[in-house]
Amino acid sequence: MKAYLLLILILANGVCAQTKSEVTDSARFSSNLKQAELYKETDRKKSVQYNEEALSIAQKNNKKLDEAACLDLKGYILNKDNKFGTALQCYLAAFVLVENLENYDKSWFSGKAGVPHYRLRLLANIHQNFAHVMRATGNNENALFHYRESESLFKKIGDRESFISIMFMGAVYIDLNKLDSALVYEKMAEQLLNQTEDKKYGCIVYRFTGDIYFKQGNMRLAKKYYKMGILSANAEGNLSGLMNNHVGLARYYMAEKQKDSSRFYARKVLKGFSSLKGNSAKDIDVGVAYEIMFQAYLLNGEVDSTLKYMQLAIIAKDSINKEKVSNLAVFQSLSFKEQLRLQQLEKEKELMENKFRTNSMMAGLVVVIIFGLLLYRNNRRKQKANKVLEAAFSNLQTTQNQLIQSEKMASLGELIAGIAHEIQNPLNFVNNFSEGSVDLARELKEEVAANRNLSPEEKTDFESVADLLIQNQEKINHHGKRADAIVKGMLQHSRGSSGQKVHTDVNALADEFLRISYHGLRAKDKSFNALMKTNFDDSLDKINLIPQDIGRVILNLVTNAFYAVNEKQKVCKAELVGPGRIYEPTVSISTKKLGHKVEITVSDNGDGIPQKILDKIFQPFFTTKPSGQGTGLGLSLSYDIITKGHNGDFSVETKEGEGSSFIVTLPI
């Protein structure tokens, strides 16, 4: 009986707690959050201000689901500004609040179907925005998982916004260059879009579909969808979507060599970018706008304008890439284990607070004092933990920057070692023939001094000696020029990439970096030896690429191949690996023209790559080399150079115990 009375008192107390102040807070919260949503795409500075006010009100009134909604919006804005690490923290905190069963009734917003409906819709939205962060940081598998979770939850509550997740799943498959799968998802999204009254995402669906057809070479349909995207963006007043479709149409006209049209849409892109407000301009990469202008003027043969926008594009791209690399380092420092630990801490904190709140209602002033002391202790612990985490994050970021610099210096060191070896032979010629020339000159001088009246035979002898001197000097001159050419060529490759594509002989580039890598390793380890094989396609013409970047890729692959065969040689030293055969370390490189593509293959007969780690080799900082011998950045940087910088493909074929082949495919 007492228990029932206590329950009735608690319920009555909860009803009475809805004071006039709380009603006012509810209205203020609703107004601020709606304003934050309204400005999130057009003026993110205002959106942040309104959202922070709403978050403060929700936290003050212990409205956990509404707090999660504010954190979700905050993460969305941070992701738009490329602040991936802090965005991730917002979403993890939001997940904890939404998934806690005790928070179901702690909300001012209930939706048409009550709190459970509101909770599921909020959870679906968090999954969708979490997937945006995963996609932005290249974690495509995680992005697909969370987009699917979001789609499933939206369908469960009968919300047609599930097509947004489907649309972005198509975008992930575009990033993965799986165009057939991407087209399936974008067609599904288009079909669902046609069933909804709200068409604000139409320009995005049409742009993604246009990109797919453009990459597939279906120019007619690419042009059609870009124009549909422009019409949709104009109808909805979506300037960001309008510019993205203008970019697609400008590239279409460039591919079709239509000079006037390409320049017309390039100018529209630049004009549209300059009209964007504040942080919303970050939705469109200014480097893209300048790059489109540069390519349009290049197509039209306008040299001054071409150089102007090329320089602006390089400066803008460099600035944006530095910001993204910095923010990506913060994101990567949050390991999955740390995420789980933070979630568990938040759950334990919430459970403890709920327990203290209940005890305070029943036990009175003493329990309130104890609760206050415990809360103070926990706050102190949290402050100490935050300081430790901040120090750890700072150390991780410093270490990552050092690793990236180490990777760059390692490649430069190999180049320098190669230069030293290559220049040694011509310098030996210079030294030897110089010494011989000096001796012959002295001999000639002594003979002339001793015999002033020379016979014809003696004259002939002196002429022979003079001829030898001339030949030696010619060889000295020839090899001196050769040494100069080697130094200039190697130093050019050791410099940073200009980012400008030039017509390059791929066969010569591959052969050069094969030799550089070999001699670089020989310079570090005189006992190292391996057989080098080349098989170059003589029909291959020069192709348009960034030679410094492709050279780094080839150098990395060949160096890895030499490392693999050298490690196997150490294990199999003097052991028979077949009937009457001793293991012979072999690295080969070949080129092949395949229609409108060129294939570069680097193979070795090492131990191959185990299947259990095959899907990890392109991840940043993953390496199987001993500590201090590898940074784990080589293949990751190479993959980005090929797939993002040159729109090519990068794959690997391997068999444990027999070797590996890395295959680079570049468009001609």
Image (tube, helix red, strand yellow):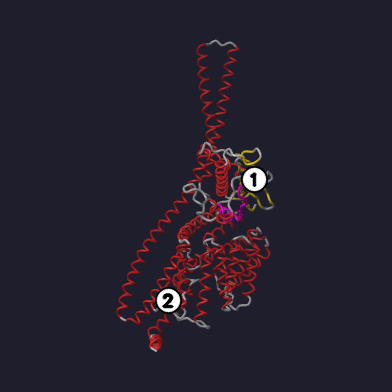
Q: Magenta residues, as a range?
A: 638-657
Three-letter code for the amino acid on which mark 1 is drawn? Ser
Question: Visible in this render: residue 18?
Answer: no
Q: Which residue is mark 2?
A: 54
Local secondary structure at mark 1: strand
Q: Where's residue 378, x and y in %?
A: 35, 69
Say above or below: 142 vs 652: below
* Farthest front residue in view: 1
Question: Visible in this render: residue 326?
Answer: yes
Q: Which residue is mark 1?
A: 590
Local secondary structure at mark 2: helix
Q: Earlier in the sequence, mark 1 or mark 2?
A: 2
Q: Where's residue 162, x and y in %?
A: 58, 74
Of labels 1 and 2, the one closer to you: 1
Mark 2 Cα shell of 10 Å, populated few (<14), some (14-19), many (≥20): many
Quarter occupied by residue 9: bottom left
Residue 270 or 103: which is nearer the viewer? 103
Say above or below: 549 vs 121: above
**Residue found at x 65% / y 58%:** 257
Q: Does the magenta portion include 473?
A: no
**Residue found at x 39% / y 83%:** 22
Q: Does the magenta portion include 646?
A: yes
Q: Where's residue 431, x and y in %?
A: 51, 28
Residue 436 or 147: which is nearer the viewer? 147
**Would residue 467 be found to the left or right of residue 4 on screen?**
right
Three-letter code for the amino acid on which mark 2 is drawn? Ala
Q: Are marks 1 and 2 in contact (CB under 8 Å)?
A: no
Q: Quadrant of the N terminus?
A: bottom left
Residue 315 or 110: which is nearer the viewer? 110
Residue 534 or 98: which is nearer the viewer? 98
**Residue found at x 55% / y 73%:** 237
